Image (cartoon, grey):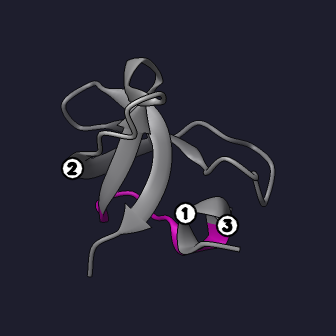
Amino acid sequence: MSEGQSRSNIKKGVKVQIVLKEDQRSGKLTEGVVKDILTNSANHPHGIKVRLESGEVGRVKEIIL
């Protein structure tokens, strides 16, 4: 399981790389800071869905430390 699939790894204010809905085919990643966590379940196979401070919504692929 990748770190972006577990809700416990993701907190508000953390810098992440997400894949936007329109970028799922290309796999292009968008970097930003988590504003809201939108997935309610503890885990999700495609990544936890978040809203970035920029307003963009996507699934977390990587957490940047």
Q: Amino acid at mark 2?
A: Glu
Secondary structure beneath label 3? loop
Residue pictured at 81% horizontal, 49% vertical: 41
Specify the label residue 4 is tagged with. Answer: 1
Q: Where 9 sits versus 16, above or below?
A: below
- Mark 1 surroundings: few (<14), some (14-19) or many (≥20) residues within 10 A: many
The front one of 53 and 48 is 48
Real-space Cα distance between discs 2 and 1?
13 Å
Query: Is 13 placed above or below 31 here?
Result: below
Callout 2: helix, strand or loop?
A: strand
Measured as percent of width and height from the top left, residue 61 is found at 46, 57
**Residue carrying label 2:** 31
Tell me if mark 3 has few (under 14), some (14-19) or many (20+) residues whose alpha carbon lies within 10 angstroms of its own.
some
Q: Residue at x 55, y 63 (%)?
A: 4
Q: Nearer the viewer, residue 30 or 55?
A: 30
Is residue 10 or residue 25 the one in the foreground? 25
Lower sequence index among marks 2 and 1: 1
- Amino acid type, callout 1: Gly
Circle 3 residue: 6
